[in-house]
Image (cartoon, rainbow, N blue to C red):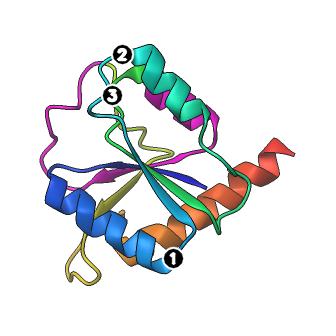
Amino acid sequence: MIIVLYANTGESLKKAFSYIEHQHAGLSDHVNLSRIGDIELRIAQLNQIPDRKTERRVTVVSNPQTGRELALLRGMGAVVCHQYGALSPLYTTEIKISPLHDLHYLPHLTFSGLPGHVFTVDELLSECKVKHRKFRQRAK
């Protein structure tokens, strides 16, 4: 399973990934392409993400920077998740939220008073698994 996390800060991203990593100990990877400037190298790296068919193995991709990367990940069945709140500068004409498909989250395990479409990170992981199963069934 591939989860794309958009986070407003590195701390938020680390909190969310740490939870996912803890839940999938030994079966999680983090792909952070922010230090790779060449789009072709970033695309090549994304194409090498292993084992997309199971939700036991989780690859988290943080903050894809171009519409091309995001489209590739969506085509692979990635579940795209956006941190709830003010939009970061990553959101441009290329990077958009898909209201019908994407999820919103806060990088906390508990939080009261959230709107119904916003998940805590533990709820987010569960929702990602459901979306991944549905994608896998459609792909058969």
**Residue wearing tag 1:** 25
Q: Which mark is residue 95?
A: 3
Q: Nearer the viewer, residue 89 or 101?
A: 89
Query: Marks 2 and 1: in contact by CB < 8 Å?
Result: no
- Considering only vertical position in the picture, is 111 above or below 75? below
Q: Secondary structure at mark 1?
A: loop
Snapshot quadrant of residue 92: top left
The N terminus: image quadrant: bottom right
Residue at x-position 48% and y-position 79%: 23
Going by the image, does 27 lie left or right of 133? left
Question: Can you tell which of label 3 and label 1 is closer to the viewer?
Answer: 1
Tell me how far mark 1 sits from mark 2, CA to CA.
Answer: 31 Å
Image disc number at residue 38? 2
Q: CA distance from mark 3 to mark 1?
A: 30 Å
Q: Residue at x 31, y 40 (%)?
A: 63
* Residue 74 sits inside the magenta stretch: yes
Amino acid type of the residue tagged 1 in the rendering: Ala
What are the residue bounds of the magenta stretch?
A: 68-93
Where does the image place residue 122, in percent across and percent down from the top left?
A: 40, 77
Amino acid found under the numbered disc labelled 2: Asp
- N-terminal label among 2 and 3: 2
Q: CA distance from mark 2 to mark 3?
A: 18 Å
Nearer the N terminus, badge 1 or badge 2? 1
